[in-house]
Image: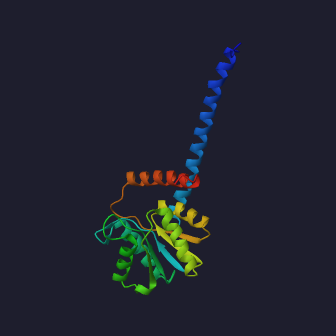
Amino acid sequence: MKRRSSPKTRNWIPRAALWLLLALAVGALGWSYWVYAQIERYAVEDHAAPSDAIGVFGAAEYDGRPSPVYRARLDHALALYHHGIAPLLITLGGNGGDQYNEGAVGREYLVGMGVPESDIIAETESRNTEESARRIAVIARANGLRRLVIVSDGTHLFRIHEICAADGLDVLTSPRPRVAVEGGSKEAERIEHEILSYTAWRLDLH
């Protein structure tokens, strides 16, 4: 004979599910706030110090020319190079959908600004942040580089730092200046993207 659950038991089940959902929501909110706080901290703190190389993470390029955001990253790295922070520049990024790639475009831009080509390594295969972080770790080991300064958007740096650190790389971060094309809504979108991307990386969902 089938045993029926009592009304008291039936009422307990949805209540437990509700508490579980509430706990998950509170946990997700707390996690998101912690990641947001880390992103904001890395975005405003410049830790550039004497190192072996400066890595510039790629951004969009247009017909072989760096986009305003990418140019701001390159110019910031160039300023660090001229200040003697490091003797070597590493540009990162693969094909942007045309015949050019971000790493090579960055190298050509820096050469055009007077940097000797021998002082630049162009990585031209990576397609996203994680690949760029892992490839720069490979480049560092192959060239005996112990410490690197990483240049990118401020909101991008926390995730880059954590991926590089997971690969055993000693990195300092230095956010590039803002450019005129940016706005508040884009900033919010970038932070949301970084929270989701960092969470996916930590959960190994990438």
Q: Position of residue 120 (x, y in %)?
A: 44, 81
- Here the colouring is rainbow
Q: Say whether residue 156 is visible.
A: yes
Q: Is residue 136 shown above or below 112?
A: above
Residue at (52% x, 64% y) in the render: 160
Outermost residue to the top: 1
On screen, residue 147 versus residue 56, left or right, reads right
Most foreground residue, 83 or 132: 132
- Does residue 50 appear in the picture of this structure? no
Rendered location of residue 68, percent (x, y): 34, 67
Residue at (35% x, 77% y) in the render: 109
Please tell me whether residue 32 is drawn above or below residue 173 in the rendered image. Answer: above
* Residue plotted at (44% across, 75% down): 77
Q: Quadrant of the N terminus?
A: top right
Residue nearest the viewer, comparing 70 with 10: 10
Q: Residue at x 46, y 81 (%)?
A: 81
Quadrant in which residue 148 is drawn: bottom right
Tell me where residue 185 appears, x and y as whole percent: 38, 51
**Quick check: 193 above or below 100?**
above
Q: Is residue 39 left or right of residue 95?
A: right
Question: As drawn, which residue projects farthest toward the front?
Answer: 1
Q: What percent of the width, then of the height, locates residue 37?
A: 56, 54
Residue 189 located left or right of residue 149: left
**Left or right: 56 with respect to 10?**
left
Q: Quadrant of residue 14?
A: top right
